Amino acid sequence: MSESAQPRGRALRIGIGAALILIVGVFAVVVGMGVVRSAGEQVVSVPVSGATAEPLYVDVQGAVAAPGVYLLDADARVVDAVAAAGGFRDDADSSGINLARLVIDGEQLVVPTVSAEGSAAAPIDDGLININAADTAELEELPRIGEALASRIIAWREENGPFRTVDDLGNVSGIGKKMLETLRPLVKVG
């Protein structure tokens, strides 16, 4: 090998080494920025055993120790959401809450308080029909929903679990895009 080829080979190795160090440095800065950005978020991840699907975001409010939005595993239940929020406060009325129910992505869970007389504060009626809890008669109150379609909605819910979003109604045979748009402002999933 000639003397002029040795310095070029050495310069090439030094250049490659410098490029690699630069790439690693840029990667470290990008990761560091992500960590700093996420440090201010108030989402808490609570592990629940055996989850395999996408995690759920649940907004837990009312008479809990630490109200907020929590990230839970896909098979989480209301009891897991309450635990993530630090448990019930002393003034919580848990008697009307089904702690064994599966939570739904994007739902807001409000734990009521016991009033001064010792009875629970009345839940707010927003007038929307909960498609995860409605029976055939309630579903038939919706426009263009008869007994057959109401039965298909309930059958879909029993076969597939609770509706995660109102858009899931589109998976029920007989509900197209147009009907879904009609139903959207009249129903809820939580």
Image (spheres, rainbow, N blue to C red):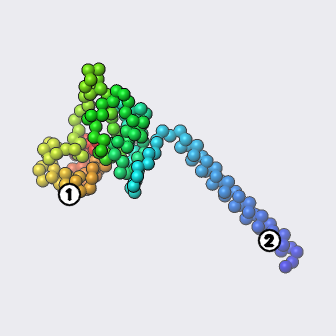
Q: Position of residue 28 (x, y in %)?
A: 64, 52
Report x, y in % for residue 109.
33, 38
Say which amino acid is labelled 1. Answer: Ser
Q: Is residue 120 above or below residue 162?
A: above
Circle 1 residue: 173
Image quadrant where residue 17 sits: bottom right
Residue drawn at x 30%, y 34% is 94
Please report the residue visible at 30 percent of the width from the left and 26 percent of the height from the top. Answer: 114
Secondary structure beneath label 2: helix
Q: Residue furthest bottom?
A: 1
9 with respect to 146 (left or right):
right
Q: Could you say which is closer to the camera, residue 2 or residue 45? A: 45
Q: Is residue 89 visible?
A: yes
Tell me, yes or no, whether the two marked residues, 1 and 2, touch with CB atoms within 8 Å: no
Compare marks 1 and 2 and give the one earlier in the sequence.
2
Mark 1 residue crowding within 10 angstroms, few (<14) / some (14–19) / many (20+): few
Residue on which disc 2 sits: 9
* Quadrant showing the C terminus: top left
Which residue shows up at 77% across the image and 68% down it?
12
Q: Looking at this view, name the residue that lies furthest to the left.
A: 147
As measured in the structure, the alpha-carbon distance from the residue carrying label 1 to the one carrying label 2 is 69 Å
Q: Position of residue 165 (x, y in %)?
A: 30, 48
Q: Is residue 178 left or right of residue 41?
A: left
Q: Residue at x 24, y 46 (%)?
A: 132
Residue 59, x across and y down, in percent: 38, 39
**Three-letter amino acid code at disc 2?**
Gly
The local secondary structure at tag 1 comes to: loop
